[in-house]
């Protein structure tokens, strides 16, 4: 397992540019952050509407 792991890591680092990897991470983080904010806002509105209905 270790004999295959190290060459695959080296190949991965040579094939991918560090800038493109970091860009992908930040794009994914931004999307997850936007979705999280939308979910929290929807939950707050839903809880507020439950209290108003009673």
Image (cartoon, rainbow, N blue to C red):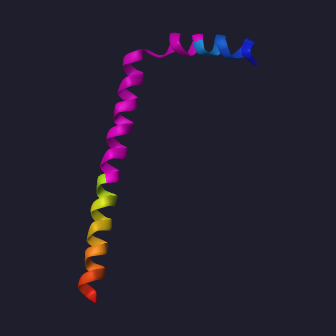
Query: Where does the image place residue 33, in percent across and percent down from the top left?
Result: 32, 45
Q: For the view shown, which residue lies furthest in the bottom direction?
A: 54
Between residue 8 and residue 2, name the one nearer to us: 2
Residue extent of the magenta highlight:
10-36
Count of numbered labels shown in the rendering? 0
- The correct choice, above or below, for 8 with respect to 24 in the image is above
Image-quadrant location for residue 25: top left
Q: Is residue 22 magenta?
A: yes
Query: Where does the image place residue 28, in percent across and percent down from the top left?
Result: 39, 38
- The correct choice, above or below, for 9 with respect to 38 in the image is above
Image-quadrant location for residue 7: top right
Left or right of 24 on screen, residue 16: right
Left or right of 20 on screen, residue 50: left
Residue in the image at 30% along x and 57% along y:
38
Q: Quadrant of the C terminus?
A: bottom left
Image-quadrant location for residue 21: top left
Between residue 7 and residue 48, name the one nearer to us: 48
Residue in the image at 41% along x and 16% along y:
18
- The correct choice, above or below, for 51 with respect to 32 in the image is below
- The correct choice, above or below, for 52 with respect to 35 in the image is below
Q: Main secondary structure of the magenta part?
A: helix
Q: For the view shown, which residue lies furthest in the left direction?
A: 52
Query: Where does the image place residue 51, in percent across and percent down from the top left?
Result: 27, 82
Residue in the image at 25% along x and 75% along y:
48
Q: Is residue 30 magenta?
A: yes
Query: Where does the image place residue 45, in percent across and percent down from the top left?
Result: 26, 70
Q: Quadrant of the N terminus?
A: top right
């Amino acid at each position: 397992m270790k004999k295959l792991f190290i060459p695959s890591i080296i190949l991965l680092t040579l094939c991918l540019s560090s800038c493109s990897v970091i860009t992908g991470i930040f794009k994914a983080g931004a999307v997850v952050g936007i979705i999280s904010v939308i979910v929290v806002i929807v939950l707050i509105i839903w809880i507020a509407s439950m209290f108003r209905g009673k």
